[in-house]
Image (cartoon, rainbow, N blue to C red):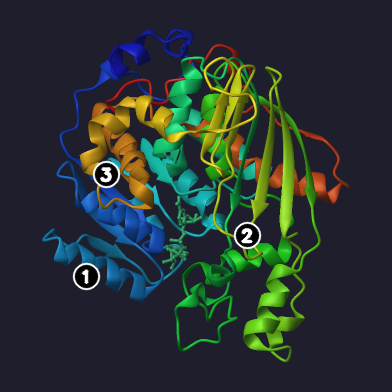
Amino acid sequence: MKRREFVKNSALAAAGIAVFQSASSFAPTPKVRIGIIGTGLRGQSHIENILRRSDTDIVAICDVDDLMLQWTTDMIKKAGKPIPQIFKGDPHAYRKLLELKNLDAVLIATPWEWHAPMVIESLQAGIKYVATEVVLGITMEDHWNVVREAEKQKANVMMMENVCYRRDVMAVMNMARQGLFGELIHMQAGYQHDLRDVKFNNGRDPKNSPVEFGPKAFSEARWRTNHSVYRNGDLYPTHGIGPVAEMLDINHGNRFLSLSSFATKSRGLHNYIVEKGGAANPNAKVLFKLGDIVTTHIKCANGETILLQHDTNSPRPYSLGFRVQGTKGLWMDVNKSLYIEGTSKTEDEWELAQPYLDKYDHPLWQRWSKETEGAGHGGMDFFVMHAFIESVKRKVATPMDVYDAAAWSAITPLSEMSVDLGNQTVEFPDFTSGQWMYRKNEFAITDEF
Ligand SMILES: NC(=O)c1ccc[n+]([C@@H]2O[C@H](COP(=O)([O-])OP(=O)(O)OC[C@H]3O[C@@H](n4cnc5c(N)ncnc54)[C@H](O)[C@@H]3O)[C@@H](O)[C@H]2O)c1
């Protein structure tokens, strides 16, 4: 079934609760005109992907950092494309960008604390397709405000969660949808990534001290590290929870009910400062609130549990730590293996997952793998941008919507609350106001986008 037909036929459309326009009500937009707020390292990698497309024009860019704007315009020039209108000079210059009358879509790749206000103001400016980098907002109130504004404006908000399109994850989702693991019962995932050099000076500005963070530092060290000073919870849940939520049909027949979180003591960032900058460095006095490892347990309405890890302050190899487990077997990414009862040869040994990943390669990857070459993060960045742009062109719902963005991102403030309350279980709100029971999961149901 074609995606348009699916959207038209779905219970979602029938129930009339879509916060977006139905597929049939518009002629297609031939070329998407996009404005981009935030041209830092992530914004530039999105721009690189957009420049490879012939169906999208970057008409405006905005940043407060002249160096990032310079790097961006150099990149656009090199690609032989026209230099877009530039908005700069103050933290609210993006409001001038939003006054432009020729924008079909806006993409936001700024620090976390700017996402919710920028999304809301884009919606209020009449933009019907707003993409934001992860996470959607900081507080529970942020998440509710974005959901309510998207509903009011009947507009789409897509959080650019690229890991939902990772090749192995999509193959496993394909296997899960075909029932290879039986009924899903337990999932594990997380963000397990040694970010110490990112949190301090991004490991790359030789003029600065190696343990600099805050206004004088570069890129994420300028803003991200402060969240580790003031907050204790799962600060970055979406790369892990996004794919898991798609497999469990969260907001589409299932939902998160409650969570409880536990945080270890905080050691890694302080130790790094002492090791790289010396005990006399002023930053050695900073008290970091973020526990080195934050573990969150989530209960779902259909009876599944999810174990989520946030582990960014310690030496370790990168791993999102996925485990997808059902009544008949499981897959784990850390050992690249699986076990399926009745299919795997012995009960005692893991089977290599790769032959299964090849066999169940998702139709999206089969169709578009040539286009993914050179796109960031092993190609998955192509798909997340492709999904957004194709939705704008066809004037259909984005495959990940505002309810997904809010539910996944709400894990951060809820986990902070749980840790603060001595690991108490706290309840998720239902951002869909009961519609989760009727909505159908449209994520990656065809090979189009
Ligand atoms: N999905 C992924 O794989 C991935 C990877 C990296 C970063 N990210 C996310 O992307 C976002 C940006 O991260 P980054 O690594 O590019 O950080 P960055 O610091 O390199 O870029 C942020 C940019 O926003 C600009 N900015 C700050 N305030 C602004 C304002 N008021 N108006 C306009 N511009 C403003 C900064 O000057 C900077 O250029 C974050 O949400 C981060 O979590 C996602």
Q: Which residue is labeled 1 in the image?
A: 74
Quick one: SS at disc 3? helix
Q: Which residue is labeled 3 in the image?
A: 372
Quick one: SS at disc 2? loop
- Whether residue 143 is situated above or below residue 357 in the rendered picture: below
Ligand 1 quarter of the rendering: bottom left
Q: Which residue is labeled 2 in the image?
A: 312
Left or right, 426 with respect to 147, comes to right
Residue plotted at (77% across, 65% down): 266
Proximity of marks 3 and 2: CB atoms separated by less than 8 Å: no
Q: CA distance from mark 1 to mark 3?
A: 23 Å
Mark closest to the chain's N terminus, 3 or 2: 2
Left or right, 290 with respect to 51, comes to right
Question: Callout 2: few (<14), some (14-19), or many (20+) C-alpha neighbours within 10 Å?
Answer: many
* Residue placed furthest toward the right: 422
Mark closest to the chain's N terminus, 1 or 2: 1
Question: Could you say where residue 128 lies in the image, as x and y percent from the top left?
Answer: 36, 35
**In front: mark 1 or mark 2?**
2
Question: Could you say where residue 161 lies in the image, as x and y percent from the top left?
Answer: 46, 42
Proximity of marks 1 and 3: CB atoms separated by less than 8 Å: no
Q: CA distance from mark 3 to mark 2?
A: 28 Å
